[in-house]
Image (spheres, grey):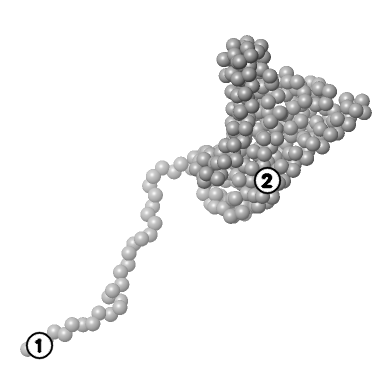
Amino acid sequence: MAVEHPVAATPGDQTRIHNIGYRNYDGPRLGRSYATRSLYSQSLRGAYGLGRSIKSKVLPMLLFVVMCVPAAIMVAVAVATKAKDLPVDYTRYAIIMQAVISLYVASQAPQSVSRDLRFKTVPLYFSRPIETADYVRAKYAALASALFILTAAPLLVLYVGALLAKLDFADQTKGFAQGLVSVALLSLLFAGIGLVIASVTPRRGFGIAAVIAVMTISYGAVSTLQAIAENQASSSAIPWIGLFSPVTLIDGVQSAFLGANSAFPGAVGPSNGEGAVYVLVVLGLIAASYGLLLRRYRKVGL
């Protein structure tokens, strides 16, 4: 009688091939515009620490409160004393609070771009449908929007308070609109300058120091030179000196075309002709900032 002997299994018999490859995606392709909007919204949220750690929320939220508290106090005083006008014009508020605005730009511009440079994630963005121009536009628009929120919120507090104090509706609405135009220009200008400086270095600390230095040193130098010009009876030079600082540029534009009182020494603001030069310089700096960012990230994305 024949006996069956079990055949020893070879290692090859235990091998299994599993199909764990990637499956084809059959859903909708959202494309560049969706990716750009997503990058914009995430960058805007990040500018106020939303979606990040509690530590990241402290400084931007604190600066936002610091911007709004003086406006709330002014409104309370105006309502309590039944004043006929607000203590500060809408167009003057951002100039008075320019140190807080500069600190916000210095803290958030490097946060927006330096981390991508430091961890070399920029090429990963460009491996998707998003392109260099989309990345720059999203980052620029996000920081400018964050700045506009920071600077427009206290103006809204002043406006609502003025209406509660039953001040003239037409005058307050006109002043509020002028203030919004002023802070919109300021937001675009400061965001561009801050991002250009921050994009130079992947080190966030260096970026913060560089932005603060540019904003504060330029304003201090221009203010000093303007004071010297006034003491030397050279008041005609005061408006031209104001072209060399971001803060005084905005001051010159709004005093020339938005009915604001100039903060220049002796209240010597630019004339309409000089104000046109201010507008051209502001628009030129905004366009130049965008162009420099494009050139920078085209090199980085290679």
Cα distance, mark 2 to mark 1?
89 Å
Tag 1 secondary structure: loop
Q: Which residue is mark 2?
A: 208
Mark 2–mark 1 contact, CB under 8 Å?
no
Q: Which residue is mark 1?
A: 2
Residue 152 horizontal/vertical position (percent): 61, 27
- Compared to 171, does 251 lie above or below? below
Q: Splitting the image into 4 quarters, where does residue 283 fall? A: top right
Give the camera-side residue of 156 and 62: 62
- Compared to 107, does 301 lie above or below? below
- Between disc 2 and disc 1, whose residue precedes? 1
Residue 211 horizontal/vertical position (percent): 70, 43
Q: Residue at x 66, y 28 (%)?
A: 183
Residue 114 seen in the current view: yes
Q: Residue at x 60, y 50 (%)?
A: 115
Amino acid under label 1?
Ala
Residue 251 horizontal/vertical position (percent): 74, 27
Q: Splitting the image into 4 quarters, where does residue 57 fall? A: top right
Question: What residue occupies the far bottom of the structure in this picture?
Answer: 1
Tag 2 secondary structure: helix
* Circle 1 residues within 10 Å: few <14, some 14–19, many ≥20: few
Q: Residue at x 86, y 30 (%)?
A: 227
Q: Is residue 265 left or right of residue 211?
A: right
Classify the position of the N terminus by image quarter. Answer: bottom left
Given this view, does label 2 or label 1 mark the residue nearer the observer? 2
Q: Is residue 76 left or right of residue 50?
A: right
Q: Residue at x 55, y 45 (%)?
A: 55
Q: Which mark is residue 71?
A: none
Classify the position of the C terminus by image quarter. Answer: bottom right
